[in-house]
Image (spheres, grey):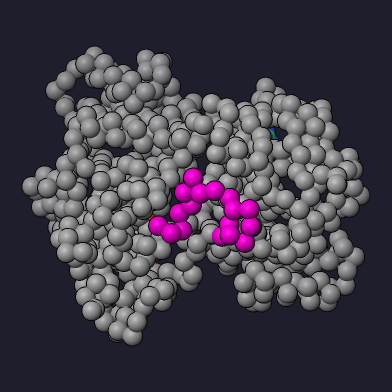
Amino acid sequence: MTDAIAVHDAQLRFGQTVALEGVSVSVPQGTCFGIVGESGSGKTTLMRAMLGLQRLDAGEIRILGTPLQQGRAALTRRARIVQPIFQDPAASLSPRSRIRTLMNEVGTVLKEPHAATHERLLVILKRLGLPDSVIDKYPHEISGGQARRVAIARALLMKPSILIADEPTAGLDVSVQGDLLNLLQDIRRAQNITLVVISHNLAVVRLIAENAVVMRAGKVVEIGEVGALFGAPREAYTKELLAAWPSVTHAASV
Amino acid sequence: MAISLRNLSVDYSLPIGTAHALRDVSLDIQKGEMLGLVGESGSGKSTVAFALMGLLANNARVTSGTATIEGRRFDLTRPNATAPLRGRGMAMIFQDPMLSLNPVFTIGTQLIEVLRRRSPASDRKTRMAQAEDALAKVKLGNPKQRMEQYPHELSGGMRQRVVIAMALLSEPALLIADEPTTALDVTVEAQIMREIIGLRDRIGCAVLLITHSLGLVTEHCDRIAVLYAGERLESGSVRDVQRQPGHPYTRMLFDCEVPIDRERHADAAQNRFTVIAGELPDPRRRPPGCIFNGRCDVSFEDCAKVVPGDYPVAGNAAHAARCLRLVTP
Ligand SMILES: Nc1ncnc2c1ncn2[C@@H]1O[C@H](COP(=O)(O)OP(=O)(O)O)[C@@H](O)[C@H]1O
Ligand SMILES: Nc1ncnc2c1ncn2[C@@H]1O[C@H](COP(=O)(O)OP(=O)(O)O)[C@@H](O)[C@H]1O
Ligand SMILES: [Mg+2]
Ligand SMILES: [Mg+2]
């Protein structure tokens, strides 16, 4: 089966800064893929490149076998296949538009009547545990956790086959982060969506992803199946990251 | 006892009413000990720190509370109660180091200012040497050169080291660190925690580590206090509390943590994350009975009516929790 996403030897510089160097990753369809690494390691840049929002200096990215193309028409076509959930959902929602307006835009892209989009939206909101009333709210009127759900709802409304989430639980309390992660896992399984999760939380990635990549300074440090990557890391840097992770030990061993 | 905080209650006045951010919170920290104060965001952790430091917002009012620091008693309901201790007896590390640093002065100038306040008699040369020494102690490379730099020339982790160096120079009896590593990468977080522990061991101060990370608490703290909606629901040694949480909230918080060694299950349905359903109660209206009742998974009839006291857990006087189950046969 063709990979959902295949990045081959991606190269990108911002002036002197090496953002991506020789990055190759492939994400099999229907799997969850984790991207971990410290800030500035190139995670968001790789995501933007996968979405076609960031041109590479060299290298190639294929989405379901088709090379990424630039331009507006290609972008619109791709929006129906790959959907992002950006790190700061509140900031990616326009402050002066109600959530409703944002959702209607999706219908316009899909050339779907507003009534039909609305119908689907109600189903998705219910699924995400959001009250229908959020539709009439402005972004500042909803909580951080709700804003993330709204961003997921909007992404799902596009009926994508691939979702890429940048730090979906950053800033959320541990008591609520699980809710969002369980939700992403459920959606993924129910709709056979390929999920890419960027996270600095190694323990979370270990649990939800089949495969993951550890990045540092724009390069791939180590890549592979999570059991091996976290259970028997080969690279010193991966070991260092794992050792630094402040983790609660099992109560039985204290 | 280095630090003892008793019955701290703080209100915030809002256009829509009065929010009770803290209700009778008491904490004790021994010299050389680190107490982890944990709780979800909005539970009142920073309010504890600000009340101790005298940094509360204008709309805040301390309605009760005393602090005893190195034998001196302070009535926290008085404005600027702890002012005599600021910069000497107490130091604070914020999540954002820029709250402690002045962008227009060099690192050197700011460190020397701390020393000047502490020991006005010493000369500039001695202070320079002490400041450089402090930077070296917190493992900031090229201390001589750093003295000449401005905060914006340093990374977030380096700035936090400078703030720790400032705290080191002020030799406080109590160091309060409010989410000091939340904005940092894990490897830097581990280094910063090492420097905070190094500081504590050098000057033997008490440390109040405010964090939402139980991982940090179990790795570094001696004792833990669990705050929920402005009330302390449990306190005890980290070991005792982790082994046998006396409050369901504490147990649920620990259950939400994902251990780094938890392996992915082949059956995807097994890879679930634990959640605490529900939300913090409205800070303007305390529900009757136990404050956690609405989210508790083992509550019974009385929990909605009777306000629990602090009961010992497993007969251990140093481990207390505010749960009726502890006194219900
Ligand atoms: N638009 C941009 N212009 C200049 N530099 C950028 C830009 N976007 C990212 N960078 C740089 O590229 C590197 C990788 O950034 P990023 O992908 O955001 O990392 P991460 O998401 O892992 O924190 C960083 O050094 C960052 O400063
Ligand atoms: N200046 C303020 N005015 C009104 N309410 C405030 C103010 N500061 C904090 N609060 C409220 O007090 C409660 C505790 O806040 P805080 O101490 O910041 O909690 P934490 O640090 O645990 O996240 C929250 O409900 C918060 O919204
Ligand atoms: Mg990023
Ligand atoms: Mg806080």
- Residue B271 lies in what quarter of the image? bottom right
Q: Is residue B260 magenta?
A: yes
Q: Is residue A45 left or right of residue B305?
A: right
Residue A244 falls left or right of residue A71: left
Queried whether the magenta region covers residue B192, the answer comes back as no
Look at 73% across and 75% down and name the residue there: A122
The image shows residue A103 at horizontal and vertical percentages of 76, 66
Give x and y (percent) for residue A161: 80, 56
Dominant SS type (magenta): loop
Relative to A115, is A99 on the left or the right? left
Decide: is A230 above or below B110. below
Residue span colored magenta: B254-272
Q: Nearer the viewer, residue B91 or A234?
A: A234
Q: Residue furthest left?
A: B71
Q: Left or right: B229 with respect to A84? A: left
Is residue B217 at all visible to an observer of this figure?
no
Query: Residue placed at 9% from the left, 48% from the top?
Result: B72
